[in-house]
Amino acid sequence: MAQKTLIYIVDDEPMQRELLKDNLEKMPAYEIHAFPTGEECLAASQVRIPSIVFLDYNLNSQVRDAMDGIDILKELKKISAEIEVVMISGQDQIEVAVNTMKYGAFDYIVKGEGAFLRAEKTVFNIYRYHKMAGDASRYKKLMIFFGVGMLIMIAVVVILQTKGLIRSSPSWY
């Protein structure tokens, strides 16, 4: 059986957290865990590194001294740069979105009517991005292999020409 992709959800609003979790659990290929604080998510990430984390931008409505979303984002990237973080927030401000991207967030979703559909699409976009990155890596390796092969072939031809084993003009001339 294939291992499920691990997704963490961090939101201090219980209703929002559970709705997002329920929505993403419809997809059978994902294992979903939800946390009310970023600190709990960080502790869990030390044990099992998630592939994707949906992270609330403001995380201090329940615990006043809680780290905010940007601080958690930075800490998650220290644990593993491969973790894709999707920031979710009620703030519809471009400056906030740009700030989260600056620290390595994959996407920024504004809470609201279309947020759950957008979250699903973001999961598929992350999958597609990693597939394309893998394909690009394979093509790059193939091109390097082809280039080295061509260089070796040219070197062999030059060596054979200098030793007189092949002529520089074809025999039909």
Image (cartoon, rainbow, N blue to C red):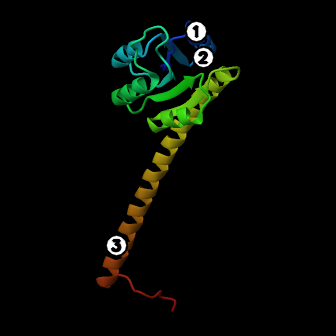
Q: Nearer the viewer, residue 147 or 149?
A: 147
* Image side of residue 90 versus residue 5, left or right: right
**Numbered disc 1: secondary structure:** helix
- Check disc 3 and report the residue beneath it: 155
Mark found first going from the N terminus, 2 or 3: 2
- Check disc 2 and report the residue beneath it: 24
| Residue 127 appears in the picture as rendered | no
Q: Within the image, what quadrant is residue 24 found in? A: top right
Tell me the residue at 43%/51% (across/down): 141
Q: Nearer the viewer, residue 108 or 48?
A: 108
Tell me the crowding category of disc 1: few under 14, some 14 to 19, or many 20 or more residues within 10 angstroms, Cα based: some
* Image side of residue 65 versus residue 115, left or right: left
- Is residue 61 placed above or below 88 in the rendered structure? above
**Outermost residue, bottom direction?**
173
Tell me the crowding category of disc 3: few under 14, some 14 to 19, or many 20 or more residues within 10 angstroms, Cα based: few
- Check disc 1 and report the residue beneath it: 18
Q: Nearer the viewer, mark 3 or mark 1?
A: 1
